[in-house]
Amino acid sequence: MTGAEGQSGGAAVPAAPPAPDEVKTSRLLGTLGVGGAVAGVLLVIAFGLTLPTIEANKARELEVAVKEVLKAPARYETLYVVGGALARKVPDGTDPKKIERVFLGYGTDNQRVGFAMVSAEAGFQDLVKVIFGYDPKTKQLLGMKVLESKETPGLGDKIEKDQAFVSQFAGAQAPLVGIKTGKRSNPREVVMITGATISSKAVIRIINSALKRLGPLVDAYPQEDKG
Amino acid sequence: MSGEVSPADLHCGAHGASAGVGPRRAVPPGEDLVKGFWRENPVLVQLLGLCPTLAVTNSVANSAVMGIATFFVLVGSSLLVSASRRFIPNEVRITSYILIIATFVSIAEMALQALVPDIHKALGAFVALIVVNCIILGRQEAFAGRNPVGRSVLDAVGMGSGFMIAMLIMGSVREVLGSGTFLGVSLFGPGFEPWVIMVLPPGGFFTLAFVLLTVAWFKRRKALKAREAERHDVAVVERAA
């Protein structure tokens, strides 16, 4: 306020402007500079302290989800989508976190039980991220779990909470078709949730488009590679 | 009742001497702390911070975590603003306050993501939006920027607790009616049909209106009782005379 008054006073009297203006500017810059530097240091410390836990949480969440949609496999391995095919390793110098992944599950007899795929597309509110298990031999889904969604509480969020909806995906035949009401007449059909049709359709669309994109890669992945 | 509060004072959360405005009165430290709980509750009396109060109170857990995060940011910011108030030029004080607040919000966000990832996910963008919660900037401008560290921290603890109390009241009403649960524990059994609207945005407005109405009713009743007692005292004095 004093600065504003000083400026208006200076405009009224055409005399020389106040002398300590330059010093003031440097003090302002200094204050903000020091404040910014301290804030930066604090943030870097907090980031460094929390990053390992955040990454471990995400990895744990993904691991639980993979096991859930592959019906508790004995083990699973991570495959990377590299150059239009699935590979166990990423090319040298590439960050594996930035490459799309598919998870291949094995049973106790070392036989493949299926592939888990993660995909995200727009739902009603925001992106819906889904993981689902798929058996390429039978073209059947093994299970589905919503990993991330900001759908409407009480309505759209039923895509992850309504067990009647979620359980339909286990054993469903790809590609999926959404139906509004009634009983499923064939294994391709998924009964959508009343009041959450857009969110239900989004889940079905996400799975169908992921299978369209990743299905051929999964089919082409050689059988002899059992790890 | 001792003095009227101007809308401008309410807006910035400043109440006369408690805000450090005007000649300083001797305010007991306890007063700095307790005024935020109820008498000057930032949500229920000053009607500040209504955005998170409406948006994330659809469950008790979300309300509690948002309350704790805001409490942490408020106390941390007040401590730092008060400690550095002599070094911050008046011209850049708001910028500096926002820088300090944003730093604490970012730290709170990272901590929540690490410690309670599910609730962090449920709160979504509202954790980052604590930066623009006017309770926090209001307390820096009205109190921490003008008072010593001890009083500023007490004020922040009181206001942060007041915010948490309001969030928990809202969250409890909405979760119990909207989901039939309290902290995820079923209260009414499978026969209860939840009032889904209570966990949706309209439910936030209904609940807030109901809570504010209840608070206003209590305050009015208290004022009426005080007036009644005053009249009674006057009558007794007149009779004695």
Image: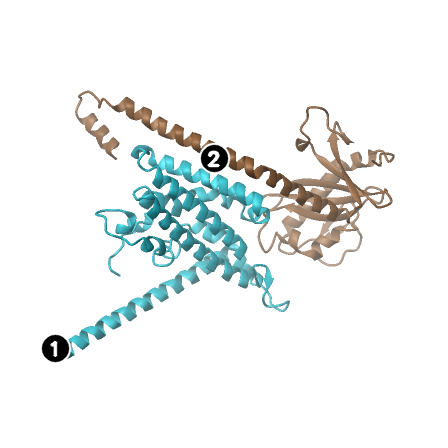
Assign a secondary structure to mark 2: helix
Label at residue B241 = 1
Q: Residue A195 occupies which quadrant of the picture? A: bottom right
Question: Is residue A77 positioned above or below B58 on the image?
Answer: above
Chain that appears cyan: B
Mark 1 nearby-residue class (10 Å; few <14, some 14–19, many ≥20): few
Query: Depth check: B159 or B176 in front?
Result: B159
- x, y percentage for residue A129? 65, 43
- x, y percentage for residue B209? 42, 60
Q: Are marks 2 and 1 in contact (CB under 8 Å)?
A: no
In what quadrant of the picture does the C terminus of chain B appear? bottom left
Chain that appears brown: A
For disc 2, the marked residue is A42
Q: Residue at x 87, y 34 (%)?
A: A224
Query: Depth check: B150 or B182 in front?
Result: B150
Instruction: Give the residue at the far bottom of this rendering.
Output: B239
Is residue A152 rendered to the left or right of residue B223? right
Mark 2 nearby-residue class (10 Å; few <14, some 14–19, many ≥20): some
> Which amino acid, mark 2?
Leu
Nearer to us of marks 2 and 1 is: 2
Callouts 2 and 1 on one subunit: no
Instruction: Give the residue at the far top of this rendering.
Output: A16
Assign a secondary structure to mark 1: loop
In what quadrant of the picture does the N terminus of chain B appear? bottom left
